[in-house]
Every structure is written in structure tokens, then in C-alpha cells.
Image (spheres, coloured by chain):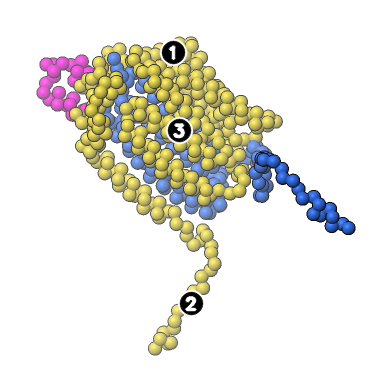
Amino acid sequence: MNAFSFEMLTNYLMLGAALMAVGMLGFLSRRNMIVMFLSAEMMLQGVALTLVGFGRYHGNWTGQVFTIVILTVAACEASIALALILVLFNRRSSLDVSLWQEIREPGQPPTMDRASEAEPEPASTGPETYPHLLIAGREPAHPVEAWTHRRD
Amino acid sequence: MDAISRLDLFTVIAVIVLGATGTYLLLPHGHGRTRPKLAHQVGYALSALSALILMAMMRFGKADVEILSKAFFYVFAFGAVFGAILTVTSRDPIHSALWFAAVVLATSGLFLLSGAQFLAAGTVIVYAGAIIVTFLFVIMLAQKEGRAIYDRMARSPFLATLAGFLLLFTLLYSLVGIQKKGPAATDHNAYVAGGRIVPASERLGMNSRSLSPDQSKVFNRAVSDANRLPEATIAEAKGTHVADGTHVAGLGATLFTDHLVTVELAGALLFVALIGALALAPPRAPIRPTVPVIVSEPASPARLT
């Protein structure tokens, strides 16, 4: 029978929907511009899965051709967006998207980020830490006499 | 409109509730008095459980899919969904980029399983090869010491989780509905039957006698010969031997005949993006003030004479 059944098509559609929804979640909630952009790319991946599944089910190449176009657009988008992120980082020296709130739509209230809601910072090990090495081999005999005799 | 059965509805709701709770616990923000480590472990467990239940919703129908390709499908699908959640919730942007690379690899595996070999290779090369590496460069350029506050704090995590998983709920609900119902009763959609591609005219229930020559011309124009998947792809999926090289050749044939304008447009788009990135990226004087350049006074015309 069919090598690519209708049920397989719905499997691909469900996976594409999951990637799309999780990507949207990340784009809405994360504040790091790079992570936001990665989430947008993940939404594109979900759409690509959907298109490839449809193309295979209908037995033509159109889905794959469209996915190639998506790949091209994603590459262009990545280059432009990374250039923009670099420019924005040079201006504010931070990747926080909340620092760019003055370009929001007029009439919108600004988002207030309360620092008390942030996760506690992980304990820093300090600027100079060295790995703790395990003792290996036999401890050599210490030359104790050399400085005990110095007293007299 | 048929409602889906109670068991399916329960499964969908379980996926949504577990996934939403797990993702909410994993998103970076202070959890009140709960210890963050405990919240993270519970979050990992719940989202993995949600992804596993989503895997249990996958059906293969009557098609005799090999056990190995089924296993690969499950592995890739689970990797894609779980990697997606970890991409979105990682505190370290480097970890996010690496998990995104894992998502891309899983997706290209799924492409390979659905007979899109060229796309699988292209996705790995373009995404995992080029885009991720550029991302890592930018992250390392723009990273500071320690964990920044914007990485430790998601913006309104509850509302974002609610929105994302509500979208997923509506999509899964409708998809499970059509999965149970199957394609339309008249089966007009069965483009591939019995291991061969059904032509457009036959698919619409019209034999060649009932079609005027003009009509059959229209049908054949709608899906041109080059645009049809080769029967080799179908035979390959059934395990029979086919000659190598048919697949990418077919994709190239349709890409450079039916979609020639698309190819040209994509090339033009890449070129424009290249120019745009070059125009945007270099730093300008007011952004990075350096040592002020001493401008020498212009030579007076009197001295020149």
C-alpha cells in the first residue's frame, strides 16, 4: 500500500505544529535577542517539516522547492539579523531587547522588568580557580632534616 | 464537524498540560520560594513526559513501515521536540545555539525519512554548518562575564507559555481529528496508491474518455511531469532496488524548469542580503568613539603660491 500514508502526513504536521508553538513561546518570552532569533528560526523549521510532508503525500516536488526557498530566506535573514544585533550591541553593549523599548508603538505602556523576579545568579567560582586534582601515585619522602637542623 | 474521541482529547490535554507546566518551570525566572534546581528537574521530567506522550500519538496506519524506520522516526521526532524546548529555555545562549543545532539535525533526519535527501543535506550544511557557527561567533563577540540578568529572567513566562501551548492545543486538536477521520471519503487525495503516482485526471475520478483533450491538457499542466515525484522514491520506500541518482536529478529537473524564476529570485535575495549585511555591520564613528583624529589645518592658498 502507500509508502507514505495519511497518518504519516499527520505525524509530520503534528511535529511541525509543536516546533512552531515552542518557537513562538520562546520568541515571546525570552529577552536575549539571539535566543529570540533562534526561536524564529525554529518556527521556520516547523513550517519546513509541514511542507515536506505535504509534498511527499501529494507526490510532487512543490513542497521541497518551497522548503529550499525557506532555506534561502533563513540564510538571508540570519545574515541581516546578526548584522543588526551587532549594531544594537555596539550601541547599548547589551543583548537585552528591553533596552530598545522606545521604538515601541505609540500609546503602548513600557514593560517594566523587576529585577527581583530574576533567577538568582549562579555562585561564581571567582576569577582565579584551578581544577582540584586528585592525588595520584605515592607520596615521596620529604627531606625533613634540611631545615630542622638549621636551628642550632 | 466530528468531535474527537474522549481518549484522544485526554491525550491531547495531557500533552498540553504537562508540556506547559514543564516549560513554565524551565523558563528562567525566580520561582518564588521554590528552589530553582528542584523546579528545573521537575520541569525536565514533565517536558520529556509530554514529548513522550506526543510520540505515543503518532500513527502509521496500514502502511507496512519497517520497524527500523519507525524507530528512527521516533528518535528524531522526540529529539526535535525535546531539543526545541531546551533551546527555548536554556540560560546560556551558547547552549541554546547547540540545542538548536540538535533540532536541525533531528529535522534533517525526518527529511531523510520522508524522502527528501537533498533537503536533508542542505539543511545540515546551511543551518548546522553555517548559521549556527555564525551565531556562536556573534554570541562570543557579545558575551560578558557571568550570567546576564536578561538571560536569567523571561518576560511574562506564564502568559507566553499559555499563548504558545494554546496554539499547540488548537493545532493538535484539529490534527488528531483529521488523523482519525482519514482523507476525504471519495479519496481524491490519494496521489500515491499502489506504489505508483496517480495522474491528476485519474485522481479526480475521470477516465480519459470523459475528458476532452483540452481538459486533459489542463490537468497535465496543473501538475507537470517534471513536478511529480519519481516512482523510484516510492519504490525505494518499499525496499525495492532503484537506480541511484534519480532523486536529486528529479528535484533539479523541476527546480530548473517549473521554478526557474524562483531560483533567480532566491539568488537575487541572497545578493541583496549580502549587500545589506555589509552596509549594516561595520561600526561607524559615533558608535565606537576612538582617539580623536587631529585634523591638520588646510594649507592656505597664500603659502601655496
In the image: residue B187, left or right of residue B54? left
Residues shaded magenta: B201-223
**Residue B100 visible in the snapshot:** yes
Q: Which residue is mark 1?
A: B4
What residue type is disc 1 on? Answer: Ile
Q: What subunit carries mark 1?
A: B
In the image: residue B229, left or right of residue B12? left
Q: How many numbered discs sit on the rendered protein?
A: 3
Residue B285: x and y in percent read 49, 62
What residue type is disc 2 on? Answer: Ser
Which element type, helix, strand or loop, lies under badge 1?
loop
Q: What subunit carries mark 2?
A: B
Could you tell me which residue is drawn at 49 percent across and 51 percent down? A86
Of residue B251 and residue A34, the one placed in the foreground of this image is B251
Q: Which residue is mark 3?
A: B103
Q: Earlier in the sequence, mark 1 or mark 2?
A: 1
